[in-house]
Amino acid sequence: MKVLLIKDVKSLGKAGEIKEVKDGYGRNFLVAKGFAKVATAEVIKEWEEEQRRKKEEEEALIAKLKEIESNLKDKKVVIKRKLGANGSLFGAVTKEEIAKEILAQTGYEIDKKHVELDKAIKATGEYEISLKLGHGIHAKVLVEVTGE
């Protein structure tokens, strides 16, 4: 019996491979547990279509992320915070604040988990912040912290 593996199966193969297995193992374990489908021409064609569609979606996402990266690299995000008597900030500028300001000032929604800070921002000034956009694409944005 030929089966198309839907998920990786230890000691058998990886998802997308077509394997020849014994009938009982194929029907009673692989197909019943959702690890594989019987490899008919129609099932193989559907699998190939789904893989092609996933690849196109990923390529579109990568193109969008590269566009965001190129648009953010020459942007400056200004964050205004209250200052103490000696001119220092109350607390530190958080990743969440940076993400909110990027959304407000540029229109790009960045998850706070994707903002990389080397050390906490506790003083006014300009800081270059790295953003992990995904798929190995990193954007740099200039953040200026000023007092009110």
Image (spheres, helix red, strand yellow):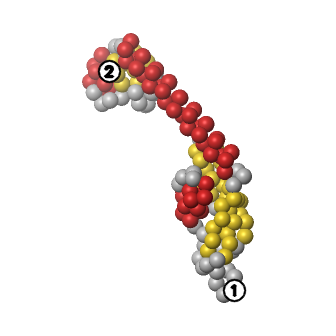
In the displayed structure, does residue 54 sit left or right of residue 36? right
Query: In the rendered view of the protein, which quadrant contains the N terminus?
Result: top left
What residue is rendered at 55% in x and 38% in y? Answer: 61
**Image label count:** 2
What residue is rendered at 56% in x and 59% in y? Answer: 104
Q: Amino acid at mark 1?
A: Asn
Q: Nearer the viewer, residue 148 or 97?
A: 148
Query: In the rendered view of the protein, which quadrant contains the C terminus?
Result: bottom right
Q: From the top left corner, tell me how far across and down residue 21 is, in percent.
A: 37, 17
Q: Amino acid at mark 2?
A: Gly
In the displayed structure, does residue 7 sit left or right of residue 34? right
Circle 1 sits in a helix, a strand or a loop, which is it? loop
| Callout 2–callout 1 Cβ contact below 8 Å | no
In the displayed structure, does residue 108 sit left or right of residue 124? left
- Give the Cα distance between marks 2 and 1: 73 Å
Q: Nearer the viewer, residue 93 or 38?
A: 93
What residue is rendered at 59% in x and 76% in y? Answer: 91
Q: From the top left corner, tell me how far across and down residue 110 is, in percent.
A: 55, 53
Q: From the top left corner, tell me how far across and down residue 40 is, in percent.
A: 36, 13
Q: From the top left corner, tell me how far across and down residue 106 is, in percent.
A: 61, 54
- Residue position marked by numbered label 2 in the rendering: 26
Q: Nearer the viewer, residue 82 or 138?
A: 82
Q: Earlier in the sequence, mark 2 or mark 1?
A: 2
What residue is rendered at 49% in x and 30% in y? Answer: 54
Asked if residue 13 can be seen in this view, the reply is no
Please tell me whether residue 101 is drawn above or below residue 132 in the rendered image: below
- Residue position marked by numbered label 1 in the rendering: 86
Circle 2 sits in a helix, a strand or a loop, which is it? helix
